[in-house]
Amino acid sequence: LPPKFAQLGLAYDDVLLLPNETDVIPSQVDTSTHLTREITMKVPAISAAMDTVTESDMAIAMARNGGIGILHRNLSIDDQASQVDVVKRSESGMITDPLTVNPEASLTDLDKLCGRFHISGLPVVDQDNRLAGIITNRDMRFIAPEDYDHLKVKDVMTKEGLVTGPSDISREDAHRILAQNKVEKLPLVDVDGHLTGLITVKDFVKTEQYPDATKDGQGRLRVGAGIGFLGDAWQRASALMEAGVDVLVVDTANGEAHLALDMIRRLKADPAFRDVQIIGGNIATRQGAQAMIEAGVDAVKIGVGPGSICTTRVVAGVGVPQLTAVYEAAQACQAAGVPCIADGGIHYSGDIAKALVAGASTVMLGGTLAGCEEAPGEKVLLHGKQYKLYRGMGSLGAMAPRGKKSYSKDRYFQADVTSNEKVVPEGVEGEVPYRGPLNAVLYQMIGGLHQSMFYVGAHNIPEMWEKGRFIRITDAGLRESHPHDIVMTAEAPNYTGM
Ligand code: RVP
């Protein structure tokens, strides 16, 4: 037999960071980082591609707060692509292909469109894309919803004295015109009156409100999306790319699978995907990271089995304790200049710091964010407390949903199983406490990271890699780390118990 035992694997709870001499002020640290080779972010956090974590609301909130969301793929290609569209249209410097409405459309149709994209009004254009008017909630304010069906857009839109700007207007001029005319939307038109763009006041406000937002070159929020590698995966990738996705994540439980690596190679070789960054995962060893790098990924995602809902380590007996996995994989990644993502098992803000010190550039969060307002699903009341559903993508519910198609079984290479009873789950389903809006949760998680950076003496993430050192601890050390010998009587916003 060949030698069988690798090194000892360590989890986040097995270590602590050593304090250092420091001149760092926690509020002044720089947490900016690389998501991929080409995309940078101000906050090293990513929301997981899970159907109880990231849909468009979460992706918008994550990008506004300086991170990014990866839309899950347990839904049809059209639905996933339209979620990309919702994020990309949620705010922008200038919208070059604004949503529009036809003068003949009913107010019911208009209302649906506005609801879907969370917008308050639209430019109205004729068949030739000539601006005919604008319709906003101001025009709709005194119309009873019963009348929506028989009234048309042209009956209520504003058409006189339209305030417009030229196609090549500067941001400053646009702001001035909006302010002078006290309007919220500025359609841009060419010399023949064709609509060429739209600038809205909301976007100026959002830019001030969210200075750290992760945005593309056109000022639109960035968004990622998960894809597979079997069946219609290529079609999915193409549809997402056309909708404007910034990052595709080839998402599998075993990134060393040849099919996943082939998908990455094909995407990287195709000039059509030139502007889309490709993340590959998950792997948990140095050799796994190396395979991803050789396939050409723009970032490597690390984690086999650390997820809070994951049973891979018991069902298959496979995995690597996450701190060691990150440290090992990061050695290959850093040598190749490819950022890596520590995915799963992050419970406390201190774990984010440990993942970064081990060599990661960012962390991916599932369970920590599933309780947020912006995560999909309703709140449920259990024993007088509010909870939200959280489930593994390898759980029975996600791989064999009753009466629905599962689009993500292939993450666990179970695409060919036809009977639901024959699914072998690698995850569980449950509830996590409701935690309110994402910005409050991230504030605590990233605030904790700022404190870590102060203790470590790191002004930025590369200094975390350089200066951070771990000390291994025992069970007694772990017990000592958590609150002890006290009955907690108040909930802390950043501590949920051991
Ligand atoms: P956590 O943040 O600890 O809840 O872990 C989230 C991660 O767990 C995901 O990003 C994904 O890599 C992994 N996952 C998702 N589903 C399952 C499963 O069913 N086993 N695991």
Image (spheres, rainbow, N blue to C red):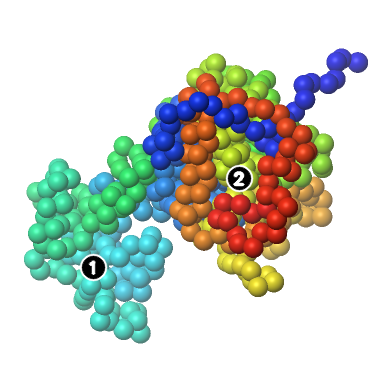
Mark 1 vs mark 2, foreground winner is 2
- Residues 86 and 326: in front is 326
Kindly state the secondary structure of the residue where label 2 is placed: loop
Q: Nearer the viewer, residue 318 or 342?
A: 342
Camera sees residue 367: yes
Q: Which residue is mark 2?
A: 348
Residue extending farthest to the front is 485
* Residue at x 70%, y 38% (from the top left corner): 13
Q: Is residue 277 left or right of residue 395?
A: left
Residue at the spot x=31%, y=84% of the render?
Answer: 144
CB contact under 8 Å: marks 1 and 2: no
Query: Where the N terminus falls, by quadrant?
Result: top right
Image location (x, y in percent) of residue 120: 30, 65
Q: Residues within 10 Å of mark 2 (few under 14, many from 20)?
A: some
In front here: 388 or 15?
A: 15
The disc labelled 1 sits on which kind of residue? Ile
Label 1 sits on residue: 135
Left or right: where 102 falls relative to 55:
left
Task: Report the residue at 30% width, 43% height from top.
Answer: 219
Image position, residue 306 (x, y; %): 70, 40
- Cα separation between marks 1 and 2: 47 Å
